[in-house]
Amino acid sequence: MDWRKVISFNFQGLFGGVTEDDITEGPAAPTFSTRWKWFSIIERLAGGDITKFETVYKVSYISALNTLSYWKERDDYQVRLQKRQEMMKSHK
């Protein structure tokens, strides 16, 4: 199997495409160039600190993808929890 397909499958939470929450309509919908995807991964792992980029480059890609997958799932959970709490407050 092609290694890109294996990575895309195993880390589909990161590379799964657009979710329903990400969809915006209209001609003024904001977009960001796809050429920055890998750079944004390095930047996120370095915590935005350019002096740590070299350290990030030395991390195995599996460790990096596992970390990013964890962060994404954790962040998604926190967003869902916040939405639920807001909904419960509005229905009191």
Image: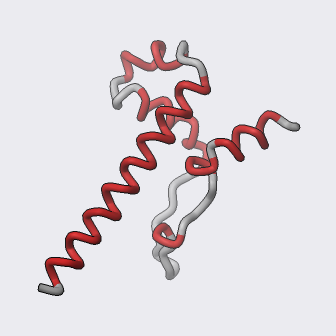
Q: Is residue 79 above or below residue 7?
A: below
* Camera-nearest residue between 67 and 48: 67
> Which of the 4 quarters of the picture holds residue 62?
top right
Q: Residue at x 46, y 66 (%)?
A: 30
Outermost residue to the left:
92
Q: Quadrant of residue 78?
A: bottom left
**x, y (%) of residue 25?**
50, 80
Front residue of 28 and 13? 13
User: Would residue 9 be found to the left or right of residue 1 on screen?
Assistant: left
Residue 87 against residue 71 in the figure, above or below: below
Picture residue at 57% right of the left edge, 36% below the top: 38
Task: Quadrant for residue 81, please give it.
Answer: bottom left
Q: Residue at x 62, y 58 (%)?
A: 17
Residue 26 position in % (x across, y down): 50, 82
Number of numbered labels in the structure image: 0
Name the spot of residue 41 as percent of width and height, x first.
50, 35
The answer to whether 82 appears left or right of 54 in the picture is left
Instruction: Looking at this view, name the residue that lies furthest to the right.
Output: 1
Q: How is the image coloured?
A: secondary structure
Give me the residue at 32% from left, 60% from top: 79
Give the quadrant of the N terminus. Answer: top right
Given residues 60 and 47, the one toward you in this image is 60
Image quarter where the C terminus lies is bottom left
Q: Whole-percent x and y of residue 10?
A: 67, 42
